[in-house]
Amino acid sequence: MIPRYSRPDMVKIWSPETKFRIWFEIEAHACDAMAEIGVIPEENAKAVWEAKDFEFDVARINEIEAVTKHDVIAFLSHLAEIVGSDQARFVHQGMTSSDVLDTCFNVQLVKAADILIADVQALLAALKRRAFEHKDTVRIGRSHGIHAEPTTMGLTFARFYAEMDRNRERLIAARAEIATGAVSGAMGTFANIDPYVEEHVCKKLGLKPEPISTQVIPRDRHAAFFAALGVVSSSIENVATEIRHMQRTEVLEAEEFFSKGQKGSSAMPHKRNPVLTENLTGLARLVRAAVIPALENVALWHERDISHSSVERNIGPDATVTLDFALSRLTQVIDKLVVYPEKMLNNMNKFRGLVMSQRILLALTQAGVSREDSYRLVQRNAMKVWEEDKDFQTELLADKEVMGVLSEAEVLEKFDIGYHTKHVNTIFKRVFE
């Protein structure tokens, strides 16, 4: 987590100040619930809330932790310094550290998910706008990196929109799955704390009580959450890879916006590099790097160990902060992407009608020629385009076997680009309606 790839709202979620504020709310709400059911005096619960406007001293907590070697105890000691030892003596009663740590972590992940979902919404808006802008902008589709058949730039944007819309749903589902809390005490048995306390705390924090916990919240929830982030990052890279290809000098169908005064190379003044989408490819790798550790955190010893703790202290902030930045950056790239329709047409026509080969193949089979012979007739003319720089249409019209089956008008009709775009509106309705 470095400032270069961070945005303040997401960073704030993972700050020590935010963490300790959430810890305080968990403890204070727990005191309220215990007072409500008569376990502790009401005045003690009220006294804890007197610290709600206090700025917790992170340096002081760290100082205490240096002695206690326990972060939750250090925080509780600092809270007692604020509230007073006598008034704070019921704080954390019947609870265990994981009640605070796990519930807080899930609150932070829920807050992070809210930001990420909003990020995807902004990206969807940009993709939709560019899709309709270029709905009919014809470009060549590629398979294996080789010219295939015509498509449109609008369909490319629409495809990415549909993928990101699925990611939005994944994030919503991941948020719902992670939005649980546990205040169930050692081993999760509620032996020393009433289940009502957990219900009260979770309600106040916008969580649901974990149906059954041990001393920790089950980590399959967290594995699913970070797996969802990994999928979103891969989709970001999917879009970035397409843009990087389009910006190749010999392709140049689109490129990242190059601002006035921007420099592309320290050595070569002519360079305009796809630096933003290359950066996104790298950031996607970082987010995906959190997935395997999250999966490995699922298998903990018995009712609790802390092998997951060091992992989550890293991947929680790192993955969410990085993905937040990446989604925002991709939205900016899509918003400002410079598209070159004429270059798209030039590239598509580079091999002189070759991309219409399937239409001729189908026409021959429909005219009664076997598929094997149809393929042979079309391929032998297609290879002349590849190897001798011939014109595909011209070669077909000069082929006696082809013309013995098809008329000139039938051949010429098969080179209509509109044939390949006739269902664009149908696809757009499926995606956007």
Image (cartoon, rainbow, N blue to C red):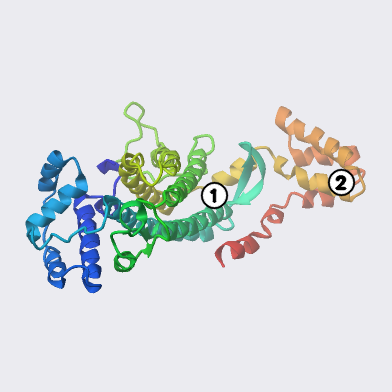
The residue at 21%/70% (across/down) is 35
Q: Amino acid at mark 2?
A: Leu
Viewer-nearest residue: 105 or 398: 105
Q: Which mark is residue 341?
A: 1
- Give the residue number, with chain letter if any, for mark 2: 364
Identify the residue at horizontal 42%, vertical 48% (top origin): 219
Quadrant location of residue 230?
top left
User: Mark 2 and mark 1: span between their CA atoms?
Assistant: 32 Å
Q: Position of residue 354 (x, y in %)?
A: 72, 40
The answer to whether residue 6 is left or right of residue 349 is: left
Q: Around disc 1, counting alpha carbons within 10 Å, would you say few (fewer than 14), some (14 to 19), or many (20 or more)?
A: some
Looking at the image, can residue 190 be seen? yes
As drawn, is 188 to the left or to the right of 157? left
- Tell me which residue sits at (21%, 65%) in the image: 31
> What residue is rendered at 13% in x and 59% in y?
89
Q: Position of residue 249 (x, y in %)?
A: 49, 35
- Quadrant that contains the N terminus: top left
Residue lying furthest top in this view?
267
Q: Secondary structure at mark 2?
A: helix
Inspect this view and state whether residue 56 appears.
Answer: no
Asked whether disc 2 touches disc 1, contact meaning CB atoms under 8 Å apart, the reply is no
Q: Which mark is drawn over residue 81?
A: none
Quadrant holding the C terminus? bottom right
Query: Which image quadrant for residue 172?
Result: bottom left
Q: Nearer the viewer, mark 2 or mark 1?
A: 2
